[in-house]
Amino acid sequence: MPLWFIIYIAYYKKMKNQEIARAFSEIADLLELKGENPFRIRAYRRAAQNIESLSRDISKLSEDELTAIPGIGKDLAGKIREYLSHGSMEALENLRQEVPPGLTGIMSVPGVGPRTARLLFEKLNVRDVDELEALAREGRLQGLPGIRKKTEENILRGIEMLKRGRERQPLGKVLP
């Protein structure tokens, strides 16, 4: 078997595991944004971590092998099978529709997690990163529970990092 084929197969296996782990992490984030049961949120996070650390291709595991993974019961195993056969999970798609789209964008700012994003949305109706930046520059985030001047500065720094990341260019363009 050629080396390139072995590398491709290894990469493909890892990618499927990472895709499913990312989907479970996103479900956990969206559940947290909605203020759902912390035990359920933790179950999705734990499942995502365990799937990501798997050395085997998740698509090759039997039902019994799936449920033998710590944190994976019949329900989550069913969601894994659904993702593998359809390329999506109905539960994730439903959650994406229930949560305002800007909130997931706010969570892409380093230092802003689901809890903070939810607080910003509920108290200040922040719907996107631009609104968050404007409010932080005006000093209006201070005074919210858990947000002080230092947190506000960290959020502004996180927004700058996020913007710099968007401006990244392929190395071939930067260094011709």
Image (cartoon, rainbow, N blue to C red):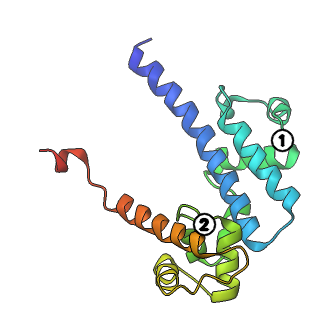
Q: Which mark is residue 159?
A: none
Identified by mark 2, the residue type is: Val
Residue positioned 80% across, 72% down in the render: 35
Q: Position of residue 21 (x, y in %)?
A: 66, 45
The residue lying at 71 percent from left, 49 percent from top is: 82
Q: Is residue 94 among what the camera can see?
A: no
The quadrant where residue 94 appears: bottom right
Which badge, 2 or 1, is on the more N-terminal residue? 1
Left or right: 168 as drawn, with respect to 126: left
Q: 127 or 116: nearer the eye?
A: 116
Q: Which residue is mark 2?
A: 112
In the rendered view of the protein, which quadrant contains the C terminus? Answer: top left
Q: What residue is shown at x 59% (from left), y 70% (from top)?
A: 151
**As displayed, is residue 13 above or below residue 124?**
above
Amino acid under label 1?
Answer: Gly
Viewer-nearest residue: 29 or 88: 29
In this figure, which residue is indicated by the disc labeled 1? 71
Q: Is residue 140 above or below residue 23?
A: below
